[in-house]
Image (spheres, helix red, strand yellow):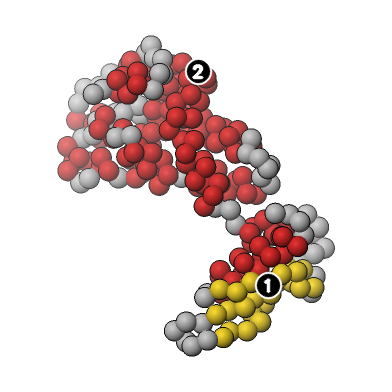
């Protein structure tokens, strides 16, 4: 299987094969072989920009609308080195990577930093070759499920409550531990969340951090923000 078989399977058009090939050429490979096209670093720069805009657009369209701070957090998670490397592994894209012997020997083909850069370069190449429509078409196929996962995993009740409070700079938010019950090996924390000294919610859990999140959720429900 070649990268072009992969593109064909996903219904993605291509014309400039040299450009697509370049996306998978690591600098270590160039150092050991005569490669006219060079390495993938410039394409990586382009792909990073495409991914930033793509993820911002997709997150912007989520309903109900997400606040700016939450969109920023989720975009960072979505295009992180770890997240992009996961997409590469899911689709076996690193099989197309061209590495120098040294990098190959030290596990470069499965290193997050290298394969996430390769993915950015790949997207950059598709964008330059076929434009935004085809690049977005490919990203929708590879990333939609991850956008949904990020949406579910990174929802943070404390962040949402903080954003609500920050809308009025005069307000302050404090989490106070009201009580700790149970044995030392299985405690139960009860936390109250206060806004300007008034209690807006309570939360209980086996650890303080989760109890704070539960208190924030309780407050958001009472404020009709959920």
Q: Nearer the viewer, residue 151 or 93?
A: 151
Quarter of the picture holding the C terminus: bottom right
Q: Residue furthest bottom?
A: 183
Image coordinates for residue 206, horizontal then vertical, percent = 52, 75
Residue 176 in percent (x, y) is at 67, 77
Q: CA distance from mark 2 to mark 1?
A: 51 Å
Q: Is residue 113 left or right of residue 208?
A: left
Mark carried by residue 131: 2
Residue labelled with disc 1: 202
Mark closest to the chain's N terminus, 2 or 1 = 2
Q: What residue is drawn where x is 35% and y is 18%?
A: 8
| Residue 175 in sight from this viewpoint | no
**Foreground residue among 34 and 11:** 11
Q: Are marks 2 and 1 in contact (CB under 8 Å)?
A: no
- Residue at 68% from the left image edge and 72% from the top image edge: 202
Label 1: element kind: strand
Q: How many marks?
A: 2
């Amino acid at each position: 299987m070649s990268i072009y078989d992969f593109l064909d399977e996903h219904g993605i058009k291509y014309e400039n094969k040299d450009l697509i090939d370049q996306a998978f050429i690591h600098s270590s490979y160039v150092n050991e072989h005569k490669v006219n096209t060079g390495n993938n670093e410039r394409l990586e720069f382009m792909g990073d920009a495409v991914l930033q805009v793509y993820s911002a657009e997709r997150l912007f369209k989520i309903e109900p609308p997400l606040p700016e701070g939450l969109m920023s957090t989720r975009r960072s998670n979505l295009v992180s080195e770890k997240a992009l490397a996961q997409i590469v592994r899911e689709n076996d894209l690193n099989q197309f990577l061209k590495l120098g012997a040294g990098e190959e020997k030290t596990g470069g083909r499965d290193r997050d930093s290298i394969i996430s850069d390769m993915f950015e370069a790949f997207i950059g190449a598709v964008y330059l070759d076929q434009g935004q429509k085809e690049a977005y078409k490919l990203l929708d196929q590879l990333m939609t499920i991850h956008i949904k996962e990020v949406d579910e995993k990174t929802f943070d009740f404390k962040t949402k409550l903080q954003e609500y409070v920050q809308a009025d700079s005069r307000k302050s938010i404090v989490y106070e531990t009201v009580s700790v019950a149970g044995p030392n090996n299985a405690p139960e924390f009860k936390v109250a969340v206060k806004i300007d000294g008034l209690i807006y919610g309570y939360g209980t859990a086996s650890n303080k951090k989760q109890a704070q999140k539960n208190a924030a959720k309780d407050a958001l429900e009472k404020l009709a923000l959920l």
